[in-house]
Amino acid sequence: MSATSMLLIKGTFRAAFSAPDGDTILFLPDNVADWKLVPGVNRVLPKGDGRAPIRLEAIDALETHYGDKDSPSGVQHQPLNLAHQARDELLASLGFTNVVRDGEFVKSTTPDAVPGFILTRGADIFGRCVALVSRTFPPVFNGYETEVDEDLLKKTANYHMIDLGLAYPTYYAAFPDHLRASLTVAAREARNARKGVWAKDATTEGAKVIGMDSLTAETGAVILPKLFRRLKDYLDLNPADPSLACFPAFLAGNSDKFYIQGNPKQLTGLHNIVEITNGQTVKMTRQAEEITFDEK
């Protein structure tokens, strides 16, 4: 596989009997054995009927349900108006209508399945296939690799979500540079137009955090989902004390590995680009598109 090629797998997208969000959807290949073709060290872990979750490559939408129900704060979410807007737009863009839900769980959709394809370079450590997703006509036969250019990228739901400002760009090292550049242009245009999350984003301006409600209420801070997840996990360590005094040390211990655009030095720990001011205000010193994370 070349640095810019991806494996194409045809199949159908599914939403019923799952809890999709703005960057995750179920996919069932036309040939379930095709999951074995996905490259990389991590294996796709399909369900008994062959379906597996797709984690949309290079984007991160606001969380609709994150965490363990047995953790101190339970399963949590970011401001649901925008989180649900992203989820609903992803489903609509793939062709689902009449979505019947029970909370975050989807009971049924019309149609039950939508034909399409994924373009993938591998899976994550959770067994999810990481991919570009599209319902357009596939550019090559099933099971073949294809070079992904900007025109093909723009036919994906990944690009669509960034273009509408409903997801943050979130890049990992294996994602091709020319595709990253295209998504970055779209993300910056959405930010300048204050579309979607960008109308309220406080990631680099600073979000005052005095407990989980500061991050989960409808009026709560809209921030990069990765930062939200780290804050949720940190606050769960001592729910009675929402102080952020030890948050930098927590980030250092979490050991996220990443690069800043234009700097070849690998950094370890988000404390390198996260600041705490006035004891309770947290902000990142770099925009999302400037960061390239190492795969874990």
Image: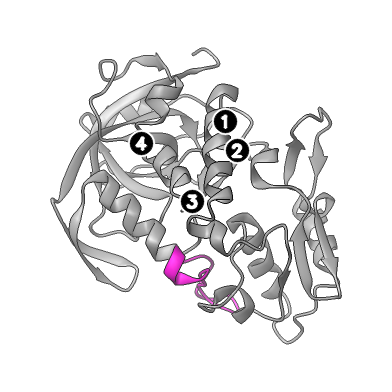
> Disc 3 versus disc 2: distance between alpha carbons?
16 Å
Question: 199 above or below 126?
Answer: below
What residue type is disc 2 on? Answer: Tyr
Nearer the observer, disc 4 or disc 1?
A: 1
Nearer the observer, disc 1 or disc 3?
A: 3
**Quick check: 59 left or right of 258?**
left
What residue type is disc 1 on? Answer: Arg
Q: Which of 45/275 is in front?
A: 275
Q: Does the magenta stretch include residue 270?
A: no
Q: Tell me whether circle 2 and circle 1 mark residues in contact (CB < 8 Å).
A: yes
Q: Residues within 10 Å of mark 2 (few under 14, many from 20)?
A: many
Residue lying farthest front? 193
Q: In which quarter of the image is residue 295?
A: top right
Q: Tell me whether circle 3 and circle 2 mark residues in contact (CB < 8 Å).
A: no
Q: Name the residue under label 2.
A: 171
| Local SS, label 2 | strand
> Disc 4 versus disc 2: distance between alpha carbons?
16 Å
Q: Name the residue under label 4.
A: 133
| Local SS, label 3 | loop
| Local SS, label 1 | helix
Q: Where is residue 92 in the image (x, y as percent from the top left)?
A: 26, 52
What residue type is disc 3 on? Answer: Gly
Q: Compare marks 1 and 3 and give the one earlier in the sequence.
A: 3
The rendered magenta stretch, by its main secondary structure, is classed as loop
| Local SS, label 4 | strand
Q: Where is residue 117 in the image (x, y as percent from the top left)?
A: 29, 31
